[in-house]
Amino acid sequence: MSDLFVHLDWAEIGAAGLDTLIMLAGSLAATVIIGLPLGVVLFLTGPKRLLAQPVAHAVLSVVVNSLRSVPFIILLILMIPLTVLLVGTSLGVAGAIPPLVVGAAPFFARLVESALREVDPGVVEAAQAMGATHRQIVLQALLPEAMPGVAAGVTVTAVALVSYTAMAGVVGAGGLGDLAIRFGYQRFQTDVMIVTVVLLLLIVQALQMIGDRVVARVSHR
């Protein structure tokens, strides 16, 4: 059995795991910061909504759908010049975060929009009847009611980002994905591949468990 794990460098694996978690935390935070308001705007400017703006909604929808339709591995390569401009490098953890955010923010925005659509229209009508402003309706009525769906969306996005971080290893982004590609695939070190895959699975399971608990805590049902 020991012959199967002769290539493992636990210090390197630990560092790669930490890089993956840093990429995940940084990109998830930026994705929520960008994607949440974007999803709210998509919802509010939609047909028969508070701020119905057909042209603005159509333009935003095209942009969001276009970014979502580009395979992430291609997006990584396309964004190399912009990533270098933003953070000074396209390699390592810093170089991975911009494409991760661009790939995940539109996806999360659509999840937020879907969560808001599930809110009972009566909630908005009641807030309007009490003279609430649009800002108050969004912050005190829509978002609190949609919070379980938004929390579930954050969980789904976090899980997707784990797979994105693994793909980012193709362009030298670091993390467990980079380790799996450089050693597990290119050098045929099966033991490294197995360990990195198991660690990625554990991260996904942990994220899903945490997300399920958060959803249960904020759910009104």
Image (cartoon, rainbow, N blue to C red):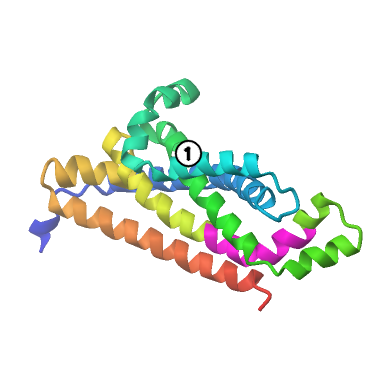
Residue 71 lies within the magenta run: no
Residue at 21%, 43% in the rendered image: 181
Residue at 71%, 55% in the rendered image: 49
Q: Is residue 94 left or right of residue 51?
A: left
Asked whether residue 25 is in view, the answer is: no
Q: What element carries label 1?
A: helix
Answer with the quarter of the image where residue 71 lies: top left
| Residue 194 picture location, percent across and down | 20, 57
Tell me where the magenta segment starts and ends, as one range.
140-153
| Residue 209 picture location, percent across and down | 47, 68
Quadrant location of the C terminus? bottom right
Q: Is residue 120 left or right of residue 6?
A: right
Q: Main SS of the magenta segment?
A: helix
Residue at 58%, 67% in the rendered image: 214
| Residue 165 picture location, percent across and down | 37, 45
Crowding around mark 1 (Cα neighbors within 10 Å: few <14, some 14 to 19, many 20+) is many
Residue at 10%, 64% in the rendered image: 1
- Residue extending furthest toward the bottom: 221
Relative to 110, is 147 above or below? Answer: below
- Residue extending furthest toward the left: 3
Asked whether residue 189 is in view, the answer is: yes
Camera-nearest residue between 156 and 188: 156
Residue 150 lies within the magenta run: yes
| Residue 99 picture location, percent across and down | 43, 36
Camera-nearest residue between 8 and 115: 115
What residue does disc 1 label? 102
Q: How many marks on residues? A: 1
Residue type pointed to by label 1: Val
